[in-house]
Image: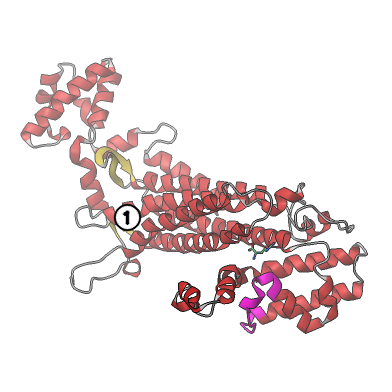
């Protein structure tokens, strides 16, 4: 290479194209996270090769044992990963050769790195589905605890972030329990679909060796082998489904986080966040910042970013494997790590926060939040059409507003000025407690309903 061409590569790569090629080509820097899955896949493969008479039992046992040695070296942090060996598959195999010698060379019979990486990654993502499921259950338990403790605390329900109708704290907490339950079911659904083994699809076309793909699938906890070798080696939709489900979950957490940020502000004072999840300001001594909530609010950015990135990597790739697909892992690793971190922090934050019952209650009564209850009373008790009731209520809201008071503070005479049929009984629906207690429709905000739903969830979550 000429000197002038060499400078084109830039400072860090002054060593020339070999170093640059190694840097762009190697995945060992990140795919070493697949070591345990890689070794599990190889052990299943080796056992199957012997069972099918493709390699000897002696060789298979040596391979199986040797792989365990390699695994323990990796787990102990005693393994020298080599970039020259490119990826986890070749790093493990090269070390196996050093440990057991010649039989190591028989391990790769009837398979390729293409099905190997596909199986490793599936196993890894499958584990993440399980881990996220457990973390979601923990978060749901924390929300349920809040719901049980505050089933009847009255707070404002918002639309457009304007006070709309009083609701209960327990009802609000259980709304998130429902969302996170659906996130779990999305992950479970994705897990079910991904639980088929690509191992034995070999490079792309299958193999002429008499392998038993059902056997390896079973050994690795899959429901069976993937039925098309081209698909098995080239699809990454299982990772995309994980990212999509994770994105929706992160979006849900982002909404809750945003509420906690708003609620913990001096303007709202709906909730007191524990010191454990807040930070002080280096300059403003009075500040308690909800940093954990803010960071959780932001995590959707990188998690959905990973989803978009991998979708974009996969888009337009011809069948079957292309090296583009090596770009799948870092996105998924990062998304999974951050999802788990956010779930753990959110569960802790929710468990430790304290609703400020008095502020919640005071805020619930602002903004004529029981106006709908008044209108409903006019319909129910006086038989007014809802549109007329809406009009009468509007008149009374205007009156209360002009007097600077709330609806329950109006006198019966003032009420009658808007509609002569109104009786003293109307006051029974006007307080915030009456309002929420009356909303007993299925899924409604009444404390009695909230307690029923909380009991249902308690049953599910233990
Ligand atoms: N490191 C590669 C990956 O992550 C493994 C598969 C390599 N296969 C190949 N034919 N070069 O995708």
Name the colouring of the figure: secondary structure
In this view, 96 is above or below 233: below
Left or right of 300 in this view: 162? left
The quadrant of the image that shows the N terminus is: bottom right
In this view, 117 is above or below 59: above
Residue at 17% x, 25% y is 394
Whole-percent x and y of residue 408? 17, 34
Residue at 83% x, 66% y is 109
Front residue (pair 208, 334): 208
In this view, 83 is above or below 149: below
Left or right of 40 in this view: 434? left
Front residue (pair 200, 429): 200
Q: Regarding mark 1 in the picture, which secondary structure is present there?
A: helix
The quadrant of the image that shows the C terminus is: bottom right
Whole-percent x and y of residue 317? 61, 49
Q: Which residue is mark 1?
A: 260
Give yes or no for residue 428 being in the magenta stretch: no
Q: Number of marks in the image?
A: 1
Does residue 240 appear in the picture of this structure? yes
Front residue (pair 252, 396): 252
Q: Quadrant of ligand 1?
A: bottom right
Q: Which residues are magenta?
A: 74-91
In this view, 200 is above or below 38: above
Residue at 46% x, 46% y is 179
């Amino acid at each position: 290479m000429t000197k002038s061409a060499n400078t084109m590569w830039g400072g860090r790569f002054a060593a020339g194209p070999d170093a640059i090629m190694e840097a762009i080509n190697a995945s060992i820097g990140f795919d070493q996270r697949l070591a345990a899955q890689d070794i599990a896949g190889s052990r299943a493969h080796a056992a199957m090769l012997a069972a099918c008479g493709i390699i000897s039992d002696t060789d298979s046992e040596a391979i199986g044992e040797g792989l365990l040695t390699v695994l323990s070296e990796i787990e102990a942090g005693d393994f020298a990963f080599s970039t020259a060996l490119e990826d986890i598959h070749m790093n493990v195999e090269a070390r196996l050769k050093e440990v057991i010698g010649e039989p190591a060379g028989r391990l790769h019979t009837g398979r390729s790195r293409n099905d190997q990486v596909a199986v490793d990654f599936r196993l890894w993502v499958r584990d993440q589905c399980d881990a996220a499921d457990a973390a979601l259950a923990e978060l749901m338990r924390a929300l349920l605890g809040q719901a049980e403790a505050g089933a009847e605390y009255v707070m404002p329900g918002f639309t457009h972030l304007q006070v709309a109708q009083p609701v209960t704290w327990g009802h609000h907490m259980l709304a998130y329990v429902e969302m996170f339950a659906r996130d779990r079911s999305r992950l479970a659904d994705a897990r079910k679909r991904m639980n088929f083994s690509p191992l034995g699809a070999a490079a792309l076309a299958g193999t002429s060796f008499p392998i038993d793909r059902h056997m390896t699938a079973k050994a690795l906890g899959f429901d069976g082998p993937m039925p098309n070798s081209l698909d098995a080696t080239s699809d990454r939709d299982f990772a995309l489904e994980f990212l999509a489900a994770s994105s929706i979950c992160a979006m849900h957490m982002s909404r809750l986080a945003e509420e906690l940020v708003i609620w913990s502000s001096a303007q709202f004072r709906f909730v007191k966040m524990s010191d454990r999840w807040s930070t002080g300001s280096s300059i403003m001594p009075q500040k308690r910042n909800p940093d954990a909530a803010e960071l959780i609010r932001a995590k959707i950015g990188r998690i959905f970013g990973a989803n978009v990135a991998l979708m974009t990597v996969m888009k337009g790739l011809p069948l079957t494997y292309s090296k583009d697909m090596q770009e799948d892992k870092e996105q998924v690793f990062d998304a999974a790590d951050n999802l788990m971190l956010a779930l753990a922090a959110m569960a802790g934050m929710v468990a430790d926060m304290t609703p400020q019952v008095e502020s919640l209650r005071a805020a619930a009564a602002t903004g004529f939040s029981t106006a709908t209850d008044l209108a409903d009373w006019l319909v129910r008790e006086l038989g007014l059409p809802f549109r007329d009731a809406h009009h009468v209520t509007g008149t009374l809201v205007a009156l209360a507003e002009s007097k600077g008071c709330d609806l329950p503070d109006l006198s019966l005479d003032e009420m009658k000025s808007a509609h002569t049929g109104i009786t003293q009984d109307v006051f029974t629906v006007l307080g915030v407690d009456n309002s929420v207690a009356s909303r007993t429709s299925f899924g409604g905000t009444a404390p009695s309903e909230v307690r029923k739903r909380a009991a249902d969830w308690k049953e599910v979550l233990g």
